Structure formats: C-alpha cells, structure tokens
Amino acid sequence: MPIVEREPPKGRRESYVLPKVPVPPLKQTLDMYLTSIKHLVKEEQYQKTKSIVEKFGEPGGTGELLQEKLLEKSINTHNWVYDYWLDDMYLNQRLALPVNSNPAMVFPKQDFRDHKDSLKFAAHLITGVLEYKKHIDTRALPVDFSRGQLAGTPLCMKQYYRLFNTYRLPGLKRDTLVIHETGSTEQEHIIVACKNQFFVMDLVVKEKTLKEMDILSQLEKMVKMAENTEERQPPFGLLTSDGRTEWAQTRDVLIKDSVNRESLAVIEKCLCVVCLDDPSGMEVGDTSRALLMLHGGGHEKMGANRWYDKPMQFVVGEDGVCGTVCEHSPFEGIVLVACTEYLMKFMTGSPSKIGRATSVSELPAPRRLLWKTTPHIQGLLKASAERLQRLVRDLDMDVHKFEVYGKEFIKKQKMSPDAYIQVSLQLAFYRCNGRLVSTYESASIRRFHEGRVDNIRSATPETLAFVKAMTDEKTSLSDSEKIKRLWDAINAQTNSTIAVITVCKLRMNPLLKYTCVPTTVEMFCCYGPVVPNGYGCCYNPQADHLLFSVTSFHGSTETSSAVFIKALDEGLVEMRDLCKTSNKPQSNKIRCRRSHSPSVLCGSLDRA
C-alpha cells in the first residue's frame, strides 16, 4: 500500500466525527461530464463522446458494475477516492518534481545586512518550525472550520500531521508516500543544504532540544565546512530533480554502497530541509524570486542545493530571497499557507532568543553527509543536471501585480472575488485563443474524512456566453446584457463550487490550472503548468491589488505568459468599466463571498 499511518495517540484526537466522502450517483456523474464538455468541443466530437457515455451508463453495463464496486469500497474504507486520487495526481506521475509538481511559497524579500544576518534568520525560522511541529505532535492546532459556502463545518486536520513526517520515495513505476510515526526519535534532525553539500543538524543533544543560539552556532559551522573545497562532495541533490523513473533507477544504483545508503536514510527521515543559498546573481524581483523557489535557477545556480523529495524545504538566500518548496503529495495548499503564515508571524512577532537562553554545552560538530561515486554515477549526475537545465530554460513565468483595483472593488459589486477573477481568466484565455478549454480550479473537500481536493470546472457555458459578449459580440450587445451574462457566469461558478465541496466527482484533463491562494501576510504562491500547451495561474486577491503568478512553457507555440498577462489586464479593466456603467445588481441576485481566507497550494485553492 502507498500509505501506512498510525492513529493519533489516545486523548489527542479531534472531538468530532467527519462524514465519509459520498459516492455520487452514476447518472449524475455522467450528466455532469457531458454538460461540462458540450460547449468546449466540436459537435461531432461531442456526439461521439455522448454515445460512449450512454453505452457506459446502460443498465447492467460497465458503469453500473464499477459503481457497485465503488459503493462497496466506500463501505469498507475511510475514503473511497483517496488512493485513486493520490496515485493519479502524484505517485503514478513520472515527470520531474520541480515545476511540474512541487509548488512554492515566496516569502517577503528580506533585507539582510550581511551573511550573519541570513543565518540568524534561518536559526529563527528553524525555531519557529520546531514550535509549530510541537503544536502538531500534541494535537494543539485549532481545528479549521469552513468559511464562505457552507460555513462553520469542521474540517479534517490529517494533512497537517503529514507536514514533517512524510517523504516521497521514488519508484520505477509508482512512487511511495512514506509516513513516519509522529514524534519518532528517528526524526530528531533536519538536513541543511549549503553549497550543494548536505549536513545533519541533530535537534536533540543530551536529551535537550537545541536553543536558537545553538542552532545558529551549528549553522555557522556548517557554512564554514561547506567552504572547504577539499572535502566537497558531488551535487547529489540534482538527482532528486530528475524524472521519477530516472531518479528511482539512480537510487537503486546508489544504495548498493553502504555510504550512500546511510546518507539517503538520514535524509529520508529528516523533519525538513533548510537550504542556505548563495546570492543568485539575478536581479531580485517577484518573477526571479519565484523561479529560484521552483527550480533554483538550474544546476549553475541553486538547483542542486535542494532535495525535492522532502515535503517541507525552506530556502534562505543570502540575497534575501526566501521561501519554501513543498512536495505536494501529503497535503494541500491550505496546510502550506497555514504553516508558512504561522512562521512569518512567528518571525515578526516573536523576538529572537539568541544570546538570552542557556545553550547546550559542548555541541557535537555538524556531520557532513558523504557520497561514494563512480564514473557511472558521475554520468548520471551530469544527465540530471542537463535535464534540469532544459526544464529551467523552458519555463515561461511572469509574476504580475495588477494595481488598478483589488478585491474590495469586486466586493462592492456584491460579487465573489474568486468567481470574478476566474471569469476574468477565462476572458483572457479566450482573447488569446478564440476558445475556452477544460480548466482545473481545485476546491477542498476537507469537510469529509481524509478529504483532499476536487475540481471546479470554471469554463462553464455561462462563462463562454459572457466572454463572447466581451469579444465577438461586443458591439452588438448592450451593457445591461453584458452585465447579466457576467452575473450568470459568476452564479454558475458559485453553484459549481457548492456542487464540488459537497462532492460531485468528475475528472478531466485540463489545459489550464487556475488557483486562488489568498494570504494574510505579504507572500505568494507559484507552480508550473500541468500540461505542455497550457497555463498555470496562481492568484492572490488583496484589498487594493491582485497578484498573479502565470506560467507556461516556451516550447509551446500556443502559449505566452506575457501575452496572457496583457490580455488579463485588459479584461480586468473592461470588467471594471462594465460594472461601473451598469446598474446595481438586483436584490434577487445571488450574493457571493470569497469562499476561503486564508487558504495554497499549494498550489491549490482549498475552498473549504
């Protein structure tokens, strides 16, 4: 089985029982599928698909047989869809983790005066991680409750308990999500990466947890050791940036040697990885900071100073570029955002304790992880470096701050900021391509036991009608008809959200992935596109501005992040002008509110 997990200690379980994820009726699933694609494909293709779907749903047919098996699995498991979803979304995927799977959260730019300042920041950050980990281990985190649609429902907290005790182990055909027992003594260390070297920091020495000044002392020693070129090891972190099958094959080669086997075991059991980055040499802006989080700039910069399999990986750059990169399979965006917001508030609201606490005397010297190489392994490292560099060159990213207005203007129109922005993204895509395509907007189903996310299909027929009103039919329609279509699109988006979070399952292969990741502190999320000829767009709606992180691949002739951003800006301005020139919405219109604040995903919208 891909997951093995123990129950929380007695007395530490949440005092509520969540329902199981329901199995939607077969007819409902099939009808929803046909409705969601009818306006996106040509009539001939639709009729062919409809025929296949009808045959699948015939009485006594394949659909009914599979439906019965799902109902049976629902009875015998906590969550019938969890393993299917985990395998399909993550563990079966063979693409490299950087860009393709791992999202990143970019912290506010730090103004370090010198190298020592950055190490103090890292020590304080690690102290905050240990505080948060303590809350997790003791089940002291407050229970999350849903907001917006169906507000007030308690949410499943299991994803929080997988932040620091999980590891994605590469496999030849499928990876394995390894989950260590909470509070295990095997996990009393972190890994520190510096100059592509990996060091072990034991967090408990002589049965005492390290204080912040001890952590700083150990970091300083590690930096000094990393500068010793005579003892420098090859950049083995590069191997984790490779395709999953390639990395699994290489790992099989590595573990034949006991030195490599021991180093891998230490990394695979750590709480987290802290990456101490040298200055990148890049001009520091939002886009460059996001790129450094996603892929480290390739092997020529910080791309080898990472270990991409570890779910929580914190980056502290000497040039003030900081953030976290997460391996996405154990948890969704809301967990990443909640953790990072806690840490940012800890950093600003909890003064550093360096110099005020009693340290652990006679700290042992930090341990550098060693590797045994052969000409064959050196060749594998070179191949991994080249593949990472191709991925770096191919990624087309544009982080853009739209400053004409923010979510407060949208709220004054009595519209949902998230639904409004989703419609604007569809308008931008239509302007660029003359059509809509299947779109993935993730929404949380944590109101169910072990719930993860499902897909809101924001490319609705109502949205298509609106974007046509703003483009092809612009001169022939009145403003009142345009605003009516805008409301229809927003209401359809809201209804789709409600249907998803109460669970109407449906999977499609999207060309677009649009995700809302609102935060309460100044940071933003980013991730790569999910298909070669599509876009990834993560957005953070703030009171007076909207922040977008748009990605695509240079290798596709169908996409351009800069062109998409330009079309998005134009559409947002036109939508504002339309709202201003139109009458106020009638009282019988559905009043929508942002569905979740704060939320990730991580890259994913966790619309609870």
Image (cartoon, rainbow, N blue to C red):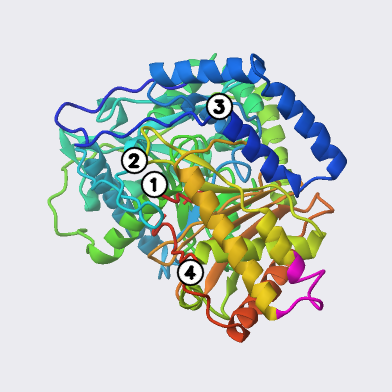
Image spot of residue 78 (x, y percent): 37, 24
Q: Which residues are magenta?
A: 468-478
The mark closer to the camera, 2 or 4, is: 4
The residue beneath circle 4 is: 588
What's the CA distance linking mark 4 and mark 1? 36 Å
Of pointers 4 and 3, the one earlier in the residue sequence = 3
Is residue 287 among what the camera can see?
A: no
Would you say 302 lies left or right of 462 here? left
The amino acid at mark 4 is: Asn
Label 2 residue SS: helix
Going 34% across and 25% down the picture, which residue do you hit?
180
Marks 4/3 in contact by CB < 8 Å: the verdict is no
The amino acid at mark 2 is: Tyr
Residue 156 lies in quadrant: top left
The amino acid at mark 1 is: Val
Checking the image for residue 87, the label placed there is 3
Residue at the farthest right position = 44
Magenta highlight on residue 397: no
Quick one: 223 or 211, which is closer to the camera? 211
What's the CA distance linking mark 2 and mark 3? 20 Å
